[in-house]
């Protein structure tokens, strides 16, 4: 296959069955689309010795407007596909899945599961001076109240205000990072949070860090922006070391699979995140 080509990957004969995990297995990461690549970039930077297998459910993106039952079903299906690739730990890089399906995933999968909502909440509380925290995310994530609950479990007196941003994921998937439409959408979503004098903003969707520069132009530099990717990578590192599953001195690799073709996927990964992806595998559900 040439660089940048998409190949079709047939599901394993044991797809959905437990293959077991070992220190030699990859870190499995999934998201509903390309947004989870922000977490992959953080993992590759912090844990260069580890293999990473990323699965983007581009056939069913976005998850944000779907019911909890559907999101749980999709998440478990994707989790089992990662197990079929020997994943030793699974990172739920989709905030919607992390908010609505994390408990189900932990019940269903025999490996550690890291949810991005938990690590984002911890980082926000630690970063906020006045404990006035804003959260933006998909409709499903915001409606679930997952970030509010997680933040208040850490800091009971925290003031948390949230905004659902349903237009942002499609804009990111289209690569419209600097478009005027994106700027107007961000102002519409963020201005009410700024009015409430937040000092910290949680990007409650892994797609949103790709809009960081556009977001900063709207909110200014005084507000701390929480990108959960780095914190998620730190959480994975801690689990792997404590469980004896961390890799030694070696060079880890990255495999990427999608459930449907995604225009601009490699361009986003390469130009925006600095990831080297030579081939994208197409995995049918």
Image (cartoon, helix red, strand yellow):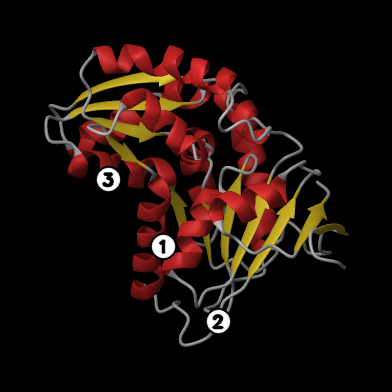
Residue at the location (77% across, 41% down)?
263
Residue at the spot 20% in from the left edge and 42% down from the top edge: 127
Which residue occupies the foreground of this view, 239 or 103?
239
Distance Cα–Cα, label 2 vs label 3: 29 Å
Which residue carries the number 3 mark? 123
Q: CA distance from mark 3 to mark 1?
A: 15 Å
Mark found first going from the N terminus, 3 or 1: 3
Q: Quadrant of residue 194?
A: top left
Rendering quarter of residue 245: bottom left
Instruction: Please provide percent x and percent y for residue 125.
Output: 21, 39
Disc 2 + disc 1, Cβ < 8 Å: no
Residue where numbered disc 2 is placed: 251
Please tell me how crowded label 3 is: few (under 14), some (14-19), or many (20+) other residues with Cα within 10 Å: some
> Mark 3 or mark 2, which is nearer the start of the sequence?
3
Please, what secondary structure does the residue beneath circle 1 have? helix
Question: How much space separates mark 2 and mark 1, taking CA atoms?
Answer: 17 Å
Q: Are marks 2 and 3 in contact (CB under 8 Å)?
A: no
**Neighbours of disc 2 within 10 Å: few (<14), some (14-19), many (20+):** few
For disc 1, the neighbor class at 10 Å (few under 14, some 14 to 19, many from 20) is many
Disc marking residue 216 = none
Q: N-terminal of the two: label 2 or label 1?
A: 1
Residue at image position (35%, 61%) is: 234
Closer to the eye: label 2 or 3 = 2
Q: Which mark is residue 236?
A: 1
């Amino acid at each position: 296959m040439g660089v940048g080509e998409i190949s079709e990957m047939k599901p394993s004969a044991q797809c959905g069955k437990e293959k077991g995990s070992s220190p030699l297995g990859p870190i499995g990461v999934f998201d509903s689309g390309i947004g989870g690549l922000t977490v992959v970039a953080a993992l590759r930077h912090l844990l260069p010795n580890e293999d990473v297998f990323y699965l983007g459910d581009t056939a069913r993106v976005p998850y944000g407007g779907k019911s909890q039952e559907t999101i749980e079903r999709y998440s478990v299906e994707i989790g089992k596909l990662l197990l079929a690739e020997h994943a030793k730990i699974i990172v739920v890089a989709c905030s919607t899945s992390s908010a609505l399906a994390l408990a189900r995933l932990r019940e269903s999968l025999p490996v550690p599961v890291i949810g991005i909502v938990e690590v984002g909440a911890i980082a926000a509380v630690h970063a906020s001076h006045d404990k006035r925290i804003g959260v933006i995310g998909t409709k499903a994530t915001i409606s679930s109240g997952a970030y509010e609950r997680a933040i208040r479990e850490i800091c009971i007196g925290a003031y948390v205000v949230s905004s659902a941003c349903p237009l942002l994921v499609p804009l990111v998937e289209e690569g419209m990072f600097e478009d005027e439409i994106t700027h107007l959408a961000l102002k519409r979503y963020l201005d009410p949070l700024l009015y409430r004098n937040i000092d910290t903003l949680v990007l409650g969707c892994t797609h949103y860090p790709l809009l960081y520069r556009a977001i900063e132009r709207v909110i200014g530099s005084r507000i701390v922006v929480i990108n959960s990717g780095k914190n998620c990578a730190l959480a994975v590192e801690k689990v792997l070391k404590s469980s004896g599953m961390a890799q030694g001195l070696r060079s880890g690799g990255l495999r990427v699979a999608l459930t449907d073709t995604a225009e601009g996927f490699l361009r986003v990964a390469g130009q925006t995140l600095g990831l080297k992806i030579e081939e994208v595998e197409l995995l049918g559900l």
